[in-house]
């Protein structure tokens, strides 16, 4: 496989957004008082910062520093400090406690020795307990994260299925990786982490199957990730927008999912997952256009139903894009194309319509989008009100009052329903947005305009690449074997090969 | 330096093409159109053309805004007309009366008035062929012994718009259907006869007036010269395949006091072909006609389970069809001197060299061509009863005695 690397440099967003570094590069001092003073100064006016001395038996005094809400204080007291206070009786050495804990004690927790003050600060802010001892220039960071900050693993709202596992990713990276590991129990599932964001220090993991995912892909993903310079990363969308191959496109160049089974399946196909700590949304690269119409349930249901539903989705995706514009084009330019009876009905319904068809269509489509947006933001109990107001007031009353014509309500409603059939949120958004320029082209130039708009769209689509893979693969460039999982969902005994572009030698 | 492609400039130029080629000035809101459902030409007394258009009133057809079921208070169409020397002139004058734009894209029928047809239809044809507005799938009809206006003003009670009724009659196969493109093709092509269906009005009293397309108007040199009658039309349509199914009744046995002696068949599949051969520098034509049929009524004493009886009935019907065809050929060759069956086209195809020599004198050759007939009629099904109700009863009685 050949990945065309980006010739342009990635945008250096941090240059504009960066705030001055908040801590120096000082080493940890062997004087406990100096360390305490330094930390207290750095965390000045941080009410949740907690620092207090501990005294172990037969040992030098120590110091514990942590952020109160981030650590599991119960574990800290009972599992860490209590045994420490009782057991450790080693009088000699520079920092026997630190060594002891690091070497032996706590298999359940993650510990590391640190020497830099900045490192200590970073560990404290990301939920570790930093333990320092008198007359030692080393400190110990013990990861004891507060589990209450995680929500439970529950069904993802955006990708609900009827058949299939009902677990979704959560905001915690470790849990998310574990959810993948549960499904792919092999050491070949590699997870490499990066810390991105100068302020947020977000952990970003790249998960892939060694030997299946092509090395070029993994190298490219890592290369692009390390080039990111930004202060904060809260969501995978930040990363997606920065490292996509093409910046100005409505189409999703990475697949987004919050389902572990979807992500595991795609990793198994030889793709790479970019998992960002703090969000359940995982990006999978490379993505193709057709993935926007595939759902994981296709692979759980029998292939006949899956194929039928896939075609239903393709059909209605086309309707989402073209239904309003076809109506506008045909009723204003090509009236001879309408069957006679229908043309008379439309003419009768439009007899008293005050607005031209294109304006009416645009108005109603925008109102529909507004209703939809309103429905999402509203609290659940008020949500249905919007649909009632929308359906009754905008729909029926406006038609009866003669402000808009009845056919356009049908067209807009059908378009709306169609858009709900596109399973992937980002593909859905792309097609919904694109229908507006197509309507305008239809209103200005008729079917000719629609043809031109579709042609432009096609040209745009074939120029897109996602991590080097042409976006319309396997239709263009054509690969016969890939069609078995695009136009139809072939039965498993046919789908034995991995996709050509990502599948490695062992496929 | 690398070559620059100026994507924005290119897009701008493309956009300019679109605007110039298909700008929004071509768009019309559908309610701003006067949707012409049917039109026709008549001859006025001073030799002008009277153009008649039937305009649909959409609110009258589909009940309008209130969508109440049942007949709407508004009439579904109106018919207006104006005189002039040419079609464009008439359209201009009609447009001046209309608040909406003249729109021919949905026209279902074009009716030629009898008098206008006899005077010659040349005048209107060029416009029909040239104008992109005119729909080629519209049907062409000739009004039988009446004006086109009489047809187009008639309210047909089964359909809101009478032009659509005419279209449906022809589309349904009961009535000789000739579309605009077939019609125009036949006019410009010397091999083909110019024919249209001929429509007449039937007054059913209380029920209103009904259309009947049971004749064929025959044109020669773009002038109407006569009509085929009902029987000839049926046979001709059947032979041409324009009529897919028909019923036929004939006297098979002589009438007696209990039985009328007739048999009726339903013909449901036909296959016709014209074969030509040149003998002695003269074309010879053989008309082949095959038909499949089933018996739908048998009012005589023949036992249909017997093969020889069926063969006899088949033969009788075949003879009847042969006579009908002979009559048609006679009408074509002697009465109208019009090549109804398009023998010319067949000769042209099958004997192109002969055609090249003789096409100029075809009008002289055609009436003298000898024609043979080969008719094959099969009765494939005889229905649920094997005999008929009378013979059935007699047999039962005989069995008992």
Image: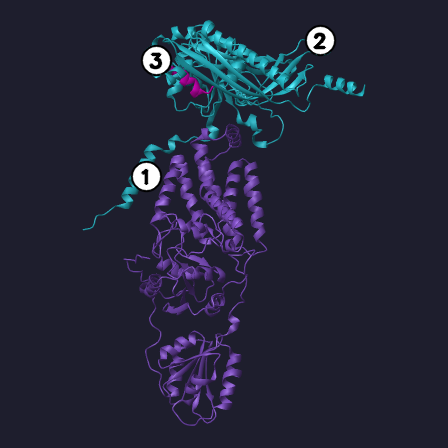
**Residue A190 highlighted magenta (yes or no):** no
The residue lying furthest to the right in this view is B401
**Label 1 crowding class (10 Å Cα cut-off): few <14, some 14-19, many 20+?**
some
- Of B368 and B23, nearer the camera is B368
Q: Position of residue A143 (x, y in %)?
A: 45, 77
Provide the residue designation for mark 3: B354
Sequence-wise, which precedes: disc 1 or disc 2? Answer: 1
Provide the residue designation for mark 2: B256
Q: Are marks 2 and 3 on the same chain?
A: yes
Q: Are marks 2 and 3 in contact (CB under 8 Å)?
A: no
Instruction: Examine the image and state in which quarter residue A496 appears.
Output: bottom left
Q: Position of residue B288 (x, y in %)?
A: 49, 16
- Of A155 and B168, nearer the camera is B168
Q: Nearer the viewer, mark 3 or mark 1?
A: 3
Instruction: Give me the C-alpha separation between circle 1 and circle 2.
Output: 85 Å
Magenta range: B178-189
> Dot 2 lies on which element?
loop
Q: Nearer the viewer, mark 1 or mark 2?
A: 2
Magenta part, dominant SS: helix
């Amino acid at each position: 496989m050949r990945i065309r690397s980006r010739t342009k440099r990635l945008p250096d967003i941090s240059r504009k957004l960066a705030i001055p570094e908040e801590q120096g590069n000082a080493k940890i001092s062997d004087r406990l008082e100096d360390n305490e003073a330094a930390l207290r100064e750095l965390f000045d006016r941080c009410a949740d910062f907690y620092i207090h001395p501990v005294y172990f038996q037969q040992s030098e005094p120590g110091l514990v520093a942590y952020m109160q809400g981030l650590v599991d204080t119960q574990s800290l007291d009972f599992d860490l400090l209590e045994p420490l206070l009782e057991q450790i009786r080693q009088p000699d050495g520079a920092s026997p406690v630190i060594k002891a804990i690091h070497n032996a004690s706590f298999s359940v927790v993650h510990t590391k020795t640190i020497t830099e003050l900045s490192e200590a600060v970073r560990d404290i802010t990301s939920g570790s307990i930093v333990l320092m001892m008198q007359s030692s220039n080393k400190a110990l960071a013990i990861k004891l994260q507060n589990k209450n900050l995680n929500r439970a693993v529950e069904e993802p709202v955006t990708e609900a299925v009827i058949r299939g596992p009902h677990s979704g990713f959560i905001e915690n990276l470790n849990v998310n990786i574990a959810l993948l590991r549960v499904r792919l129990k092999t050491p070949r599932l590699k997870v490499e982490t990066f810390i991105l964001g100068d302020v947020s220090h977000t952990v970003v993991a790249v998960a892939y199957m060694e030997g299946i995912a092509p090395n070029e892909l993994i190298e490219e993903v890592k290369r692009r990730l390390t080039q990111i310079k930004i202060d904060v990363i809260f969501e995978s969308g930040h990363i997606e927008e920065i490292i996509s191959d093409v910046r100005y496109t409505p189409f999703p160049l990475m697949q987004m999912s919050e389902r572990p089974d979807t992500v595991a399946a795609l990793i198994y196909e030889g793709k790479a997952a970019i998992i960002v700590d703090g969000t359940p949304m995982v990006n999978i690269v490379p993505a193709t256009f057709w993935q926007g119409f595939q759902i994981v349930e296709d692979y759980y249901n029998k292939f006949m139903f899956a194929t039928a539903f896939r075609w239903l989705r393709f059909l209605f995706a086309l309707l989402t894009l073209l239904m309003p514009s076809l109506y506008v084009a045909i009723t204003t330019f090509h009236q001879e194309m309408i069957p006679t009876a229908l043309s008379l009905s439309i003419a009768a319904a439009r007899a008293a319509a005050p607005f031209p068809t294109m304006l009416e269509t645009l108005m109603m489509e925008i109102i529909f989008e507004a209703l939809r947006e309103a429905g999402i933001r509203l609290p659940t109990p008020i949500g249905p009100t919007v649909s009632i107001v929308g359906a009754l007031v905008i729909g029926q009353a406006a038609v009866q009052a003669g402000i808009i014509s009845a056919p356009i309500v049908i067209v807009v409603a059908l378009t709306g329903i169609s858009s709900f059939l596109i399973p992937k949120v980002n593909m859905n958004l792309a097609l919904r947005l694109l229908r507006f320029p197509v309507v305008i082209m239809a209103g200005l130039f008729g079917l000719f305009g629609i043809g031109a708009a579709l042609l432009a769209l096609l040209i745009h689509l074939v120029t897109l690449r996602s991590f080097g893979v042409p976006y319309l693969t396997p239709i263009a460039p054509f690969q016969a074997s890939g069609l078995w999982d695009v136009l139809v969902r072939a039965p498993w005994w046919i789908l034995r090969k991995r996709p050509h572009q990502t599948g490695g030698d062992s496929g | 330096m690398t070559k620059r492609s100026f994507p924005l400039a290119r897009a701008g130029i493309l956009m300019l093409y679109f605007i110039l080629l298909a700008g929004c000035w071509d768009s019309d809101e559908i309610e701003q159109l006067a949707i012409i459902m049917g039109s026709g030409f008549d001859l006025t007394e001073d030799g002008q053309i009277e153009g008649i258009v039937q305009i649909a009133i959409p609110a009258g057809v589909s009940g309008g805004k209130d969508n109440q079921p049942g007949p709407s208070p508004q009439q579904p169409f109106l018919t207006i007309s104006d005189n002039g020397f040419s079609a464009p002139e008439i359209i201009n004058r009609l447009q001046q009366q209309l608040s909406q734009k003249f729109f021919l894209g949905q026209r279902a029928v074009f009716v030629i008035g009898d008098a206008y047809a006899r005077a010659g239809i040349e005048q209107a044809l060029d416009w029909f062929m040239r104008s992109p507005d005119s729909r080629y799938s519209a049907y062409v009809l000739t009004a039988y012994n009446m004006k086109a206006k009489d047809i187009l003003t008639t309210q047909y009670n089964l359909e809101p718009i009478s032009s659509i009724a005419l279209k449906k009659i022809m589309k349904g196969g009961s009535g000789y259907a000739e579309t605009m493109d077939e019609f125009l093709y036949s006019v410009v092509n010397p091999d083909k006869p110019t024919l249209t269906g001929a429509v007449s009005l039937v007054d059913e009293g209380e029920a209103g007036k009904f259309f009947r397309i049971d004749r064929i108007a025959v044109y020669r040199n773009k002038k109407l010269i006569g009509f085929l009658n009902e029987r000839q039309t049926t046979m001709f349509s059947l032979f041409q395949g324009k009529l897919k199914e028909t019923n036929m009744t004939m006297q098979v046995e002589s009438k007696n006091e209990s039985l009328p002696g007739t048999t009726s068949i339903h013909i449901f599949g036909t296959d016709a072909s014209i074969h030509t051969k040149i003998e002695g520098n003269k074309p010879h034509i053989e008309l082949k006609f095959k038909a499949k049929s089933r018996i739908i009524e048998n009012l005589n004493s023949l036992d249909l389970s017997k093969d020889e009886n069926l063969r006899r009935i088949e033969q009788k019907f075949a003879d009847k069809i042969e006579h009908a065809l002979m009559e048609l050929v006679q009408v074509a060759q002697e009465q109208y001197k019009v090549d109804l069956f398009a023998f010319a086209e067949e000769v042209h195809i099958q004997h192109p060299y002969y055609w090249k020599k003789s096409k100029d004198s075809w009008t002289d050759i055609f009436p003298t061509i000898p024609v043979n007939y080969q008719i094959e009629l099969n009765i494939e099904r005889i229905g649920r009863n094997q005999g008929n109700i009378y013979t059935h009863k007699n047999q039962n009685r005989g069995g008992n005695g």
